[in-house]
Image (cartoon, helix red, strand yellow):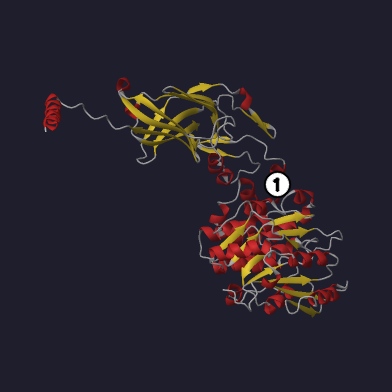
Amino acid sequence: MTTPSTPTVSVVIPVYNAMPYLEQTLASVERQSIGTDAIEIVAVDDGSTDGGGEFLDAWAARYAGAMTVVHQEASGGPSRPRNVGLDHATGTYVFFLDGDDCLGPRALERLVAMAEKNGADTVLAKLVGAGRTISPTARDVFAKNVDRADPAVVYWTLMPFKLFRRAMLEEHGLRFPEHMRISEDQHFVARAYLHSGVISVVGDYDCYYLVGRGDQGNITHGGLDYATMVAQADELVGIVEELTEPGDLRDRLITRHVKVELLRRFGRRFLDDSDTDRKAVAELARPYAERWVTPGVLARLDVAERLRVHCIKEGLLDELAAVVEWDVAGRPGKTVVRDGRLYAAAPYTGVPELCDVTDAALGASPRRRVEELTWEGTVVELAGYAYLDQVDTDALTIETVLRHRDSGRETVLPVTAEATPHLTVSRGRETYDFGRAGFRIRLDLTDVRTLSEGAWDISLRCSAHGLTAEGRLGGPLAADIPRRVERRTLALGPEGSRPYDVSLGPEGAQLTLRLKQQPAPPAPPSTLTRVKRKLRRLARRAR
């Protein structure tokens, strides 16, 4: 816990020629809602020549001990100043803030609250681009608040702009690698993630503004050459292997490096390379492909990535170029169904299992939508469409499945097929015929003899050419279908002999029908009972 003499947060700011951006950086710290008495600023001037060092000294003079400024010779990167700042930090938490970026006014308050709430060792701060681009994967990470985040999910953002519990950093001796000029933060953050007992995410507040400098002075602007990038990534893979056991987590973490560092070079730029450069970059990638891509990692790659890895390992340069060109062009060619499996129309099929897209296609199947949902009297009708992704509907069959939530018992209902010519779509140069994907379902609730009491979840099962997928109906409802559960009392059973409480509507991802039979009314009293009651009433009157 924080004591009166211990700052809540040490804000470590590495500074190198960051003027005039440094002014707004420090101003953003000064206006933090957590209060300046809870903040310690440790600014490290890494040999600035633009007056930044003097600006820091002037700012520190305003804060009587709440700001420490360290001056040192230029180190060539942010690792050493961050490490020096960390050595001087005394707060319960540490936050790294670059000298040209800014904090949202409530950022530190929100981050500390999240850490205290969950006992988190690392809290991710939502990033916002201010002249710089936030990657789609990072935006996904910050889609919402997360109390206990999956390390493999947050691993897609390895920037250091996070709140770290300082005791955790010191316990494991975590520091930034000073032999790197760019991407050094990835090594520090990767280790911090894997040593953290709890990782949390603040996703509902704009915490950190990545500022794009007009002079393109951000150190990451120039990027890394491919050889350096994969060599540094190889060190990260080593960290992952050191701190995780073989299995799912390790595979998911290494997959990130395969996709981001290893294979991204094999895109349009590869097609523009000369034959000599193609050979050189493929040979450079080969040992990393062999080392990183285990069967568990390979299973997490898409078809084009799997084919790239294979061609790199086997030295198949022409085939590799053909795969890259096919991928860049949008993967033209219709999928092929063979022996109950679905295969991509890739230009290289020397290893058929690498082209197998069955699991991916069925994982996205069935494509479905409920466009009508009516309930008149005792009859429920649903209509819409459903089909298997990347499979023509020439041999499609659709079934409605009612599954009892407690027992797992299934009842399959007939479906009336309807034409849907408007669904036929083009993908690249190919057209998929989804013209027979329509369905209409009629469920008569009077026939409750086939259904027991309880919750029955309604789903669709699509089959074609030996492929089958099932999908729930609570989510894919048309916009004009109410998202509420409707409740009625109906006389059901043989000849409508018994009243039932019936409800129908979405329950999360499920479209659910609930049945509960009302208790039978009490039997009328017998003649003897009625006579006894009358005699008792007469006796009471006589008294």
| Amino acid type, residue under disc 1 in the picture | Val
* Residue 90 picture quarter: bottom right
Question: Residue 50 vs residue 416: left or right?
Answer: right
Residue 270 position, x and y percent, is: 75, 51
Question: Residue 513 vs residue 237: left or right?
Answer: left
At 18% across and 27% down in the image, what residue appears?
A: 525
Question: Could you tell me which quadrant the C terminus lies in?
Answer: top left
* Residue 289 picture quarter: bottom right
At 33% across and 32% down in the image, what residue appears?
A: 517
Question: Residue 49 vs residue 407: left or right?
Answer: right
* Image height of 458 relative to 125, above or below: above
Residue 97 position, x and y percent, is: 73, 67
* Image height of 117 relative to 64, above or below: above
At 55% across and 68% down in the image, what residue appears?
A: 243
Residue 438 position, x and y percent, is: 54, 25
Kindly identify which residue carries mark 1: 324
